[in-house]
Image (cartoon, rainbow, N blue to C red):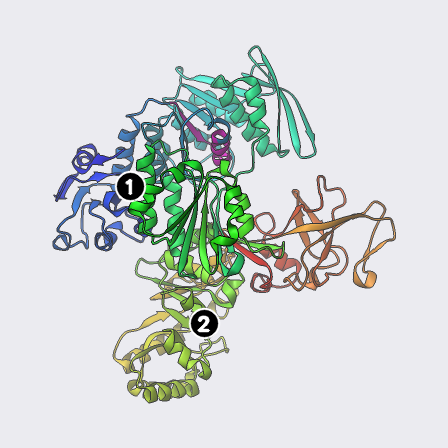
Amino acid sequence: MEYSMRYIGQITGGKWLQLASDDSIGQLLLDSRRLIFPATSLFFALKGPRRDGSQFVGELYKRGVRNFVVEGGKSSMKIEDLPDANILVVPDALAALQHLVAVHRSKFSLPVIGITGSNGKTIVKEWLNQLLQANYHIVRSPKSYNSQTGVPLSVWQMEPGHELAIFEAGISKRGEMERLEPIIRPTIGIFTNIGEAHSEGFDSRAEKAAEKLKLFDHAETLIFCGDQPHTVEAIAHWRHQSIKLFSWGHSQLDNVCIRSTETHDGWTTIGVSHEQLDLTFSVPFTDHASIENAMHCLSVLLLLKQPAEQIAARMQELSPIAMRLELKNGINHCSIINDSYSADLNSLTFALDFLAAQQQHARRTVILSDFLESGREESSLYATIAQALAWTKVDRLIGIGPRIGAHAAAFAERYTGETAFYPTVEAFRHDLAALHFREETILIKGARVFEFEEIDRLLTEQIHQTVMEVNLNAMAQNLRQYRQLLEPATRVMCMVKAYGYGSGSFEIANLLQFHGVDYLGVAYADEGVVLRKAGIRVPIMIMNTENSSFDSLVEYNLQPVIYSSSLMHSFDRWLKKEGIPAFPVHLELETGMNRLGFPPDEIDDLLKALPTAAFKVVSVFSHFAASEEQQQDPFTNRQGKLYLETADRIRQALGYPFLRHLANSAGIVRHPALQLDMVRLGIGLYGVDSANSHRLDLQEVSTLKTTIAQIKHLREGDTIGYGRKGLAANGTVIATVRIGYADGYARGLGNGAGKMWINGRLAPTIGIISMDMTMIDITGIPDVREGSEVVVFGKELSVSQLATWGQTIPYEILTGISQRVRRIYFEE
């Protein structure tokens, strides 16, 4: 559906700063970096703690956007530079967005399922889609879009052709659900549970439950678990007399009563009673959370009067939800983006945006399935997809499915890239060699029913089963956590040296560039060259400058650190010989770290040389030696004083300003007065709080996983590994896992010093660590098989804990992970 700008003005009650034409709006845009449809997009200039969306209006206007909602007050916009723009001024841009979408929602009378709770919202939503997509034309939240901005973007997708809607809502403080309720306005509610997640904004669990339950103030039916005392108590306090309560649990009073539960070989068989029906069904899961999510889904199916035999058949076909977009290495030097999670316009927009951010290859290919859930007329749908591919400069489209192939003419009309269409995945596989995938970035985007996992397997480089998963969402969250501690004018340099602390180089740099960091820092020029070749445009500082790298510095526009008089004179002579003026450099001062930098007794000579140098100083910095340690604060303060005094002398000698930076990750938290003009964010970006401040909600970015190669049942006295250092007791069971010291799992973690996480338990190492293999003691751990996944470090087992066991620091663990370990980058 589209709305005219005049109508949107009436709905929001805004005032026109300028109305050039009554354009039709089909897309809502909140992030200037995610532009796909400029002609039909309406940009809401939201204000955040550090950025005002109105500062991006000029840039978006140049890129073709003509419709804007901005907040009143001071703005940097120059109306004379936007002659064709429609600019609507409102008191609160977020409130205007939410009200507009609430009006859009009010135009539909279809059943709407609203889901909230502490855990399981996205899984329940996706499983309901799996279970009901054959019966209904469904619109649902893309991925986990459940926030104050995510919910409006989700509900905006509703089209006249939809027959059922499923939306999730999450809140983190009081008052938020009252704003989301009229946007979703569910007819059926699901309250998954009430736990400790996102409790910071509430005084108690009861208050959080009461706030979440406001989503169902106008619902007809509420589904919940009758076995959860906190949930039952919260609903009893909240209950609206007009709502029908529908509970499931083990009590005869529940609407769905669980009679029996049996677990066997990774499956759970559940017997339930509902009204006059006795039903037995199986699901391919055994964990408590999955069973709880499945029961919520079953309750919806029973409420919608789905046939019992159909319910049983579909419940056993439930599959794990891969709620993430992955980037990994592919065959023939390709990069693969796997987003075979859903096929809808909203998620396609984000996937294409992610594709556009990848600069490592000049050529881009998109493999796309039929779109089954748009609610739009097909010719219009595929025409819109063609426009999106053209706008993001996709070089080749490979369409799979009968519907997309039937609309090849729409692509021929609006999209100038190469095209190929196949009716099935099997037909594509048969033609794989003729498609010549080589040195390109490939986006795989398909509806679940097409089972694009086969395409992912065919195109992904098949190497070591030990993988490092890098959560790009977590890194972006960590960046936001540190930014909230900074003054608005303080710039951010992010350190991506040492292969991005083991997480990757250009993949991490791409993300940081997307999120607008001001500088990147690397150790050596060759690291900077790799980033430039991968399309990174952000200024890059080279911390360990070598005379042999001068040519590369200039050729790739890399900014060297000058840390000694000899290096300064060498680079100055080279620049003058090459006739290169005002080349940007950074000066490093020695203030107590005693590593690199101009010491105090060389400052006078530095000041004499600077006025005639061929380079331009863009920053002066130093390094804290112990900013994370409270007992070292007097020394840290002396460092800061010496640095500031010296930087001021350099400023007077140069006669022009430069950036001053001193604070690292711990310094940002513990020494806020020394933020200065820029900070250098390092290990904190990767989720390690070196300051131990508890002021930050950091998420560890990396998860190292491996698999079990073999399981052995040993007898008492059997020995394990080289040197026979491991000794078995009676009944000992060991697993050999595919990781060793050549992968970065240090030998010091052997003989029980280290542990790995498997099936909810810690399994200690046993014996000495081998080059490629490690043995762990899995005695007593249930459901472990050859091929089972083992977590070396990650959410369940922090890298900090592993470092403690190995008597080292997280830096060494992360940077020590071998290059042969495959990296997978994902956005959730």
Q: Is residue 396 visible?
A: yes
Residue at image position (36%, 65%) is 538
Q: Position of residue 177 (x, y in %)?
A: 37, 32
Q: Position of residue 78 (x, y in %)?
A: 15, 55
Q: Does 116 appear in magenta?
A: yes
Q: Which residues are magenta?
A: 111-129
Residue 514 sits in which quadrant?
Answer: bottom left
Q: Is residue 147 visible?
A: no
Label 1: state its secondary structure.
Answer: strand
Image quarter hosting the N terminus: top left
Residue 256 sits in which quadrant?
Answer: top right
- Relative to 99, residue 335 above or below: below
Which sits in the foreground, 676 or 700? 700
Disc number for residue 28: 1
Where does label 2 land, which residue? 623
Residue at image position (36%, 73%) is 557
